[in-house]
Image (cartoon, grey):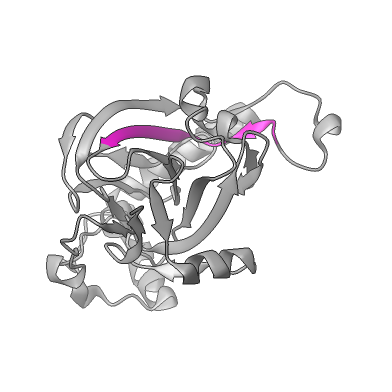
Amino acid sequence: PLVKNKFVSHLSGKFMDSSLSKIMISSFVKKNNIDLSIYEKDKFDSFNDFFTRKIKKNKRPIPKSNNYLLSPCDSKLTYLKIDKNTTFNIKNSTYTINSILKNDSLAKKYNKTTAQIILKWLRQNDYHRYMFICDGVITSNYKIKGMFHSVNPVAYKNYEVFKENTRECTCIKTNDMGLVTYVEVGALLVGKIKNIITTGKIKKGKEKGYFEYGGSTIVLLFEKDKITLDEEIINNSLNGFETYVKYGEKIGEKKK
């Protein structure tokens, strides 16, 4: 089944990149009530060309203050406090901070009880490009292949620790908010994650990358006592509600 799923995912990706997939665009636009007038173009070469369409810059203004914590994308946002034993679910797979990063030394920077994790779920009708939230320097970037673990699923019947999605991790030494790590999460075996910038200095508001059809989640990790999220977001999350935010919108501030 694993080989079959990988083949099907690969074949599906090829179709989404082909001109034949254009037939899907009009019904998708209508179903999801998408206003194409706010994008740079309204004619597309394939479904993925449409899915990764660029928005007009004046439609997503970026606040200039270095004190602001910004949303990197359009999404539904959830806030969690984590430690090394905290589990959280992303795209039908369950992770700890160590298992999602696959890097024990990096995980140690985020596994204290006051560390914070933000899960950002992009809906099908959201803008699927994402940006850097502050100035800094990329210190590392690495990819993690999606896989099934060879463990006895009976022992883990309450959650699927034996399945992992494709991921890409980018660590940024920021000028204002400490070490910030992005984890983009894609499909199980074909990630659909396209990062444009993976090395060097970066600027707040600069496009980091985009998701093709099949990728849809960003996890942001912050060190202890570096940021303060808006109270509304915290309260909504504690009460089991997601907060819808847009690309470039203020969602908090750096810790004073």
Res. 34 image quadrant? bottom left
**Residue at position x 34%, y 33% from top?**
170
Residue 220: x and y, percent? 42, 46
207, 12: nearer the viewer? 207
**Residue at position x 37%, y 65% from top?**
126
Which span is picked out in magenta?
Answer: 161-173
200, 189: nearer the viewer? 200
Residue 138: x and y, percent? 25, 31
**Residue at position x 15%, y 61% from top?**
64
For residue 133, above or below residue 5: below
200, 49: nearer the viewer? 200
Q: In the rendered view of the protein, which quadrant contains the C terminus? A: bottom left
Residue 78 is inside the magenta segment: no
For residue 75, above or below residue 3: below
User: Is residue 4 shown left or right of residue 110?
Assistant: right
Res. 179 image quadrant? top left
Residue 114: x and y, percent? 55, 45
Most frequent secondary structure within the magenta stretch: strand
121, 109: nearer the viewer? 109
Q: In the rendered view of the protein, which quadrant contains the N terminus? A: top right
The answer to whether residue 77 is seen in the rendering is yes
Q: Number of marks in the image?
A: 0
The answer to whether residue 197 is seen in the rendering is no
Residue 42: x and y, percent? 19, 69
